[in-house]
Image: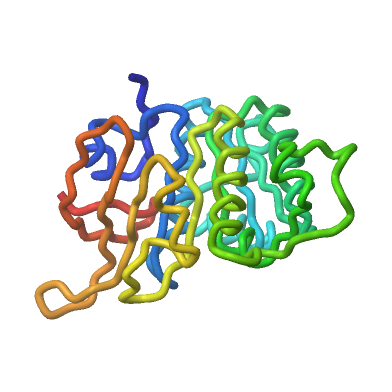
Amino acid sequence: MKRIQTGVTGLDRLIQGGIPEGLTVLVTGSCGTGKSILCMQYLYNGALMGEPGVYVAFEESKDRLVEHAKTFGWDIPAMEKKGLMDIYVIDTDDISEVLTTIKAKVDRIKAKRLVVDSLTTMMEHGVIYRSQITKEMNLMERQKVAIRFPSEGHDMTRKDIYFIIGQINRLDTTALLISEVAEKSNYLSRDTISEFACDGVILLEINTVGGSPERLLSVKKMRGTPVNLQMSIMKFGPNGVSLEE
């Protein structure tokens, strides 16, 4: 099984050397736990290894993402010029349009890696058409009556989420999907379903260790991988995030 190195020091050893190629992994946690930085680091390190990647942003502007990346020495414009990165900032709430554009951008640079920041925003603010849930994005036949997330009824919501993640799975990338969750929640995502629909789950949290608050990372599941379930302290450094050995 080919594994994709995350570029996060200490993380790959928890998952037998990296994420199995082609999986979709949920990166989840509360505000300020480092989700976006970890995922951008994954994408940028992939570019350094010659593996193109697409970053999909729903809330941050491209300028802010680029400036934030600079603080860790990540030159995103240089990678874009080489065709190794593409940042797509969403300007529509039409889920079919979003998925179609993501596919086009993945195909254009032959992306191997994908980050969606965030799946939570896509679910809560996206609009999907009834015809697409059963006909899988047949844009010529979609109805004009839209459903806004979360859809009416638990069963329908589950179908919506599995549909979207299923479309992402078809892109043939190794994808990280960022999810937001409240502190001390009993679930691993706000929608309570994404953790089951994804192949893997990486949880980031803030908790007290030795009397001091620390950012912690743990791998909850990774398909085809005997994961190390230990909680590791995550530190920010000049080159990004890393896990204490």
Classify residue 107 by image quadrant.
Answer: top right
- Residue in the picture at 39% in, 53% down: 240
Please provide percent x and percent y for residue 222: 31, 40
> In this rendering, would 139 be left or right of 182?
right
Please provide percent x and percent y for residue 20: 37, 29
Judge whether 17 appears above or below 150 on screen.
above
Residue 167 makes an appearance in the image:
yes
> In this rendering, would 58 be left or right of 25?
right
Judge whether 235 appears above or below 141 on screen.
below
Give whichever of 130, 26 is nearer the camera: 130
Give whichever of 62, 100 is nearer the camera: 100
User: Looking at the rendering, in which quadrant would you find the N terminus?
Assistant: top left
- Residue in the picture at 78% in, 55% down: 94
Please provide percent x and percent y for residue 161: 57, 52
Please provide percent x and percent y for residue 209: 14, 72
- Residue in the picture at 19% in, 57% down: 231
- Residue in the picture at 60% in, 60% down: 67
Give whichever of 44, 136 is nearer the camera: 136
